Image (tube, rainbow, N blue to C red):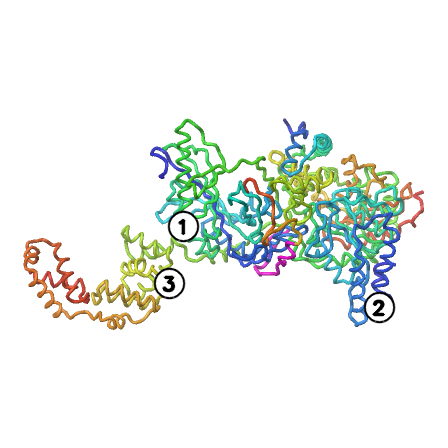
Amino acid sequence: MSAREIARAVRAGERSARGVVEESLAAIAERDGEVHAFLLVTGDEARSAADAIDAAVADGRDPGPLAGVPVALKDNLCTKGIPTTCASRILEGWRPPYDATVVTRLRRAGAVVVGKTNLDEFAMGSSTENSCAGPTRHPADPSRVPGGSSGGSAAAVAAGFVPLALGSDTGGSVRQPAALCGTVGVKPTYGAVSRYGLVAFASSLDQIGPLAASVEDAALLLEVIAGHDPLDSTSIAQAAPEVTASLDVGVAGLRVGVCDELVEGTAPDVVARVQQAADALVDAGAHVTRVSVPEMRYGLSAYYLIAPAEASSNLARYDGVRYGLRVPASDVAAMNVATRTAGFGPEVKRRIMLGTYALSAGYYDAYYAKAQRVRTLLIEAFSRAYEQVDVLLGATAPTTAFPIGERVDDPMAMYMSDVCTIPSNLAGHPAISVPFGTGDDGLPVGVQVLAPALEEARMFQAAAAIERAAPAPGSGTK
Amino acid sequence: MSEQSATLGREDVAHVASLARLALTDEELDRFTVQLARVIDHARDVAALDVAEVEPTSHPVPMRNVLRPDVVGECLGRHEVLAAAPECEDGRFKVPRVIGEAP
Amino acid sequence: MSGPSTGWEIVVGLEVHCELQTKTKLFCACPNAFGDEPNTNVCPVCLGLPGSLPVLNEQAVELAMRIGAALHCEVRSSSFHRKNYFYPDMPKDYQISQYDQPINVGGYLELPDGSRVGIVRAHIEEDTGKTSHRGESGRIHSADYALVDYNRSGVPLVEIVTEPDIRSAAQARAFVAELRGVLVAAEASDARMEEGSLRIDANVSVRAEGTEQLGTRCEIKNLNSLRSLGLAIEHEAARQVAVIDAGGRVVQETRHWDEQGGRTVPLRSKEEAFDYRYFPEPDLVPLDPDADWKARAAAGVGMLPAERRARLAALVGSPTSQQTDQLQAAVDQGLDDLVVAAVEAGAPAGLALVRAVNELAVDLVAARALDPGSFAALLQLEESGALSPTQAKTVLATLRDAGGGDPGAIARSKGFEALAEATLEGVVRDVVDAHPDEWARYLAGDDKLAGFFTGQVMKATSGKANGKAVAGALRRLRG
């Protein structure tokens, strides 16, 4: 049942929120031992929240647009009084004294939080293998990764545990697992959704985004979480974009550019699906052309300088003084070292060191400063492309879901998983991954629609058309 | 050494680990050096670009003057604050002795 | 202990951190308050909790711009950077500060002696929490553990950095005293060194007199009073001269002023070289105040100490060096408004200044509240000779304690009725007759005896006689 349908039925008194939540909790209890999408299931809190919604409906009050809809939260979103670990030992036992803005907005909209989902530690990774609690498995093939870093949220939606989940997307961490798991994943315009309460990885790139089984549900969720928040200085001073209204508009006359850089180097079965999606858009009345944004080729390098640099600073605070893990030592500096050495996993250490290097004296100008200038070049290149087309189309990830363990010892190979998603983060633009059939291995493929800043409506317009044309699950590419 | 031939070495990794308050074993130092050098090598394409005339972007969506009125809001309760502390005493966070002063 | 031996010149630049007197902290809505219970004025932002984000306090920016205007700086578009280093009282393990784009650049402060100290910059940054070292001796290096309070974490600071224009410990003290006056006038900071709302680091070097090249400097931290500032500079300069005289070289380092030992000591060397890895703070956006806002901020600066001194100097005419000291004291003590108002009400300026800084300064709070009209009326009685200086001071004390009143009535109630001229002549004559030898010597030209006769007349009249009137009577008798 879709989130929209659940909310409608609950608001109408046709279904109880409690019943919906019990179904969700039962599904999790039945299958999450295998999938391991959740780090924590908050059954008691969910049940009492559901009861409160049912009481509101009984009283004739409207619980909101997501009434009774079970939602899973990536465990880097702060939840008051509920452990928030970022899948890191260093935050073991920490219970935030406050809710993230998106969590507050979800509750206000009547959504019911059923648990916190697994992720790569501090959202650093593309497979959800870098979790102190162990990996999440792909719901369709437990030997494979669900993608990452929001792999727990993507798997929770793909496994049917919840209709909606939130993830965070710094270099593709919502879209790439969405593509690999066969769900919809959205990275909104930078600043469209408040970051307040999202544990920071790379502050100038991070955005919270919806994962859902359908484009419509993703749109519904985005409308609830987006909109100005005075607690985030980078929050855009605008109301949430009205994206649900654009879903049925169609794509007649829409100019779509199939972006060379977003299909180059991707697997042939993935390229075939992108081409098929493009053809479907032509059939629906869009003008489809090929475009090139050559500056995207610098994206990966720029990203792996900027994101680790910001991360190295954002993760300094985990020092054993105020919260989380402390490994005792004779003086405070030694305690910091012992705590951080024991508390962070290898990928987090790699990125902290990489970022420290990129910012350190003598290298700042060659690396960090240059990467920020490349970002400008990329934004300008996007602007030129958007003079010719309204949206860009490409792959979300270069391959379908890969086997667990395949890339853990080769960071560079893992980093390549984000090559198609990174440019939108560097530019601050919105992008969405829409499931579009499967690859040769029978695993889901996602196609990506990119749009200029704040043009979410246009992006959803194209995404809805692609979804309507998507091959039925299990049908081949031939 | 020019930027092109600069490759991150073992001493660099040891130095940044110390700046970042991380301890590495010899084996980790070797492994991280190889891994990080690959990323830095990959970044040579960016390091080699002549972009001196290009303004850096630190915020993808340009904004300015985001301000808050000087009005007192709610603080956390001290119990709540110290509940998370690994150790506390007299309403304060307790830490092992501090060597050296703040810079 | 004095400064360096002759032949050497001290060169000092100061870094002054002043806490802004906003209601809330720089990046969150917690109260900016001193002296509360530890860890009560804290929230996720100033505790640096994961997920929290800073939002800039508008009033802090306004006060920073006021300081810029008061120091004749150019107020510019600015941005924030992160300064990365680990320290337990810094909750994020980075400090949000302004780096290559500070809000205020290139000003100066003119000191009472007319010298000018250049201001390099005055930028906004956040304060840290407070670490108390605990253990047997109470000293940092032998402490067993430390306790951290984050109430001060995130309090807005402006760091004012001077050019190395200061040439003596006295000038450094004068600079800080004047700066305090400026900060208070701008209502930007209460500038209380004893509460830590004004904190000073001094960069000290020495060079041979007549040379231009700057010597190697040492930074001295922990100067929390004007006295410490002066002593530390003198000791540090002397130490550097001694090092050079002994054939050594001064090493650039950070030193600590040891108040008890009366010396500067090197801070324990750090295991790691500091590399702050500054980069633009991604959680904040650039600050670009428009002309209107800058003008509003500048208009918020009250009358500065220099303007106040100039205003008094203009009333006095051409001040003597003693009067220059007095008018500075009047400004420092906040009595200049009273003096100006009294002069406007008809009081003689010089006398008003003297009585303000000498007699009224005993109780500044009462003095600042004194009715200027009453003060002026009293000064007129003294000036005309109707009251003797002694009588006038007594009446003034009563006026001050009462906040004002009719000085004539107070004088009468104390029996300070001025003696009629004829009565006075009679008393003077009696005194002269009683001391014929002295009178002869006075007639012979020993003028010092005028004082003797005045004293005798005062004694005979219980102090009611006016000194000037007695002198006149003596002159007339002498013929």
The total of numbered circles placed on residues is 3
Q: Which residue bears the numbered disc 3?
A: C368
Q: Is residue B13 visible?
A: yes
Instruction: Point out the tag, 3 or 1, that comes first from the N-terminus.
Output: 1
Front position in the image: C127 or A168: C127
Mark in the foreground, 2 or 3: 3
Write down the chain letter for disc 1: C
Query: Is residue C255 left or right of C168 when viewed as pictured?
Result: right
Region rendered in magenta: B63-82
Mark 3 to mark 1 CA distance (whole Å): 20 Å
Q: Residue A12 bears which disc, if any?
A: 2
Write down the chain letter for disc 2: A
Residue B75 position, x and y percent, is 61, 59
Q: Amino acid at mark 3?
A: Arg
Q: Is residue A291 visible?
A: no
Residue, far front: C136
Q: Which residue bears the numbered disc 1?
A: C177
Query: Is residue A361 left or right of A449 when viewed as pictured?
Result: left
Asked if labels 1 and 2 share a chain, the reply is no
Residue C385 position, x and y percent, is 20, 65
